[in-house]
Amino acid sequence: MVEQPEKPGIILVEDDPVFATYAKKILKDQKFIVHHFSNPGEAIDHFKINNKIELVLMDYELGGPMDGVDTARKILEIRDVPIVFLTSHDEEGIVRKVNTVKSYGYVLKSSSPALILQSVAMAYNLFTAMKKVEESENRFRMMYENHPAVMIIVDSVTGKIREANHAAAAFYGYSREVLKSKNVREINIKTDEEIRRQMEKALTEEQNHFYFRHRLSSGEIRDVSVHSGPIREGGDLLLFSIVRDVTLEKRLEKKQARLQTRIELITRQLDELSELLLETGAYQYSMSTPSLRIAEKDSTIIHLIQKGLNNREIGDKMNVAEITVKKRLAALYKQFGVKNKYQLIEYLSSHYLL
């Protein structure tokens, strides 16, 4: 047999003994645990010590110094709990006063048992659902506030920073309160028009990854990578952004780009020098000299020929132009008195120069 979930404990605050008996029977027939009090002070005292009370049925028209609304306020000062008011009347004044305290509506005492039970069930279920949402929001807020990543939430219309977590405060060098008083235009060094265009792209999800330069409280400018997307809060459309400092990465990229440019320049200069040497004949040497050695680049060309590569493929491998390979081969043909690459390889092999 599947066990049914335990019904919530209920405090019934009612000074009319007839209706109290009627209400207790309705609730107990549905397996609710009912604690009845006609004195509001006793009900409050019991609520303080019984943490299993999960709903309060409160008579609006209690006699004595405290009416139902006053008693409800006292109970809610102890802890949050759903309260449903019971009343014999539904005048506008009663409704207005009930609305001055956090409650889950009211039900007429003349209502059918089914309607009274439905009001209790709806109040309890709504309260439970709201608590789950509240707990979820609190978990998200804790994650957001304590997450090591820099996070900010920006008003998509005004650019005002609505929220900033602890990591954001530490990164920008402001307290959270000061940071939340600022506009994103105060930290982003782009023009207002550029910022507006980028925010529109994030809002429409046309683009969600951006690179900006942000100003810290010290005045230092940092390169940042920003992932940003739209979220709603109430009726407001906001931008939720995760900011990552990429200043060091950008500096390394620039250094690498400069180094690559220098390498390419030196490579071009070496190619030009080699071509000049070949054209002027300064590269010539006599094969009869015992101490002759083949230049390293020529040796590389010959080994690549042996592997079956053509001139273009050799040029790609050596990061030189195809014409340079042809010129080097032509000089080698002339030097060794051969007509093609196959005769060249045969000659060098037979003279133990490979």
Image (cartoon, rainbow, N blue to C red):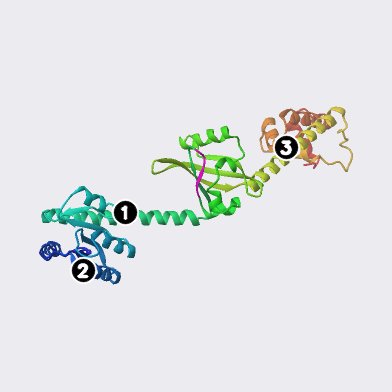
Distance, label 3 to label 2, CA atoms, is 89 Å
Amino acid type at image mark 1: Met
Q: Nearer the viewer, residue 27 or 135?
A: 27
Disc 2 crowd rating (10 Å Cα; few below 14, some 14-19, many 20+) is some
Image location (x, y in percent) of residue 39 = 21, 68
Tell me if label 1 and label 3 are in contact, CB under 8 Å: no
Judge depth for marks 2 and 1 and give the one in front.
Answer: 2
**Depicted 333 relative to depicted 259: above or below:** above
**Depicted 243 relative to depicted 44: above or below:** above
Q: Nearer the viewer, residue 65 or 5?
A: 65
Secondary structure state at the residue bearing disc 1: helix
Q: Earlier in the sequence, mark 1 or mark 3?
A: 1
Question: Where's the C terminus, which quadrant?
Answer: top right
Q: Which mark is residue 39?
A: 2
Magenta residues (range): 158-163
Disc 3 crowd rating (10 Å Cα; few below 14, some 14-19, many 20+) is few
Left or right for 54, reference 153: left
Image location (x, y in percent) of residue 63 = 19, 63
**Depicted 210 relative to depicted 36: above or below:** above
Distance, label 2 to label 1, CA atoms, is 30 Å
Could you say which quadrant of the image residue 254 lies in? Answer: top right
Residue at point 55%, 42% (across, down): 184
Residue at point 49%, 55% (across, down): 145
The answer to whether residue 347 is magenta is: no
Amino acid type at image mark 2: Asn
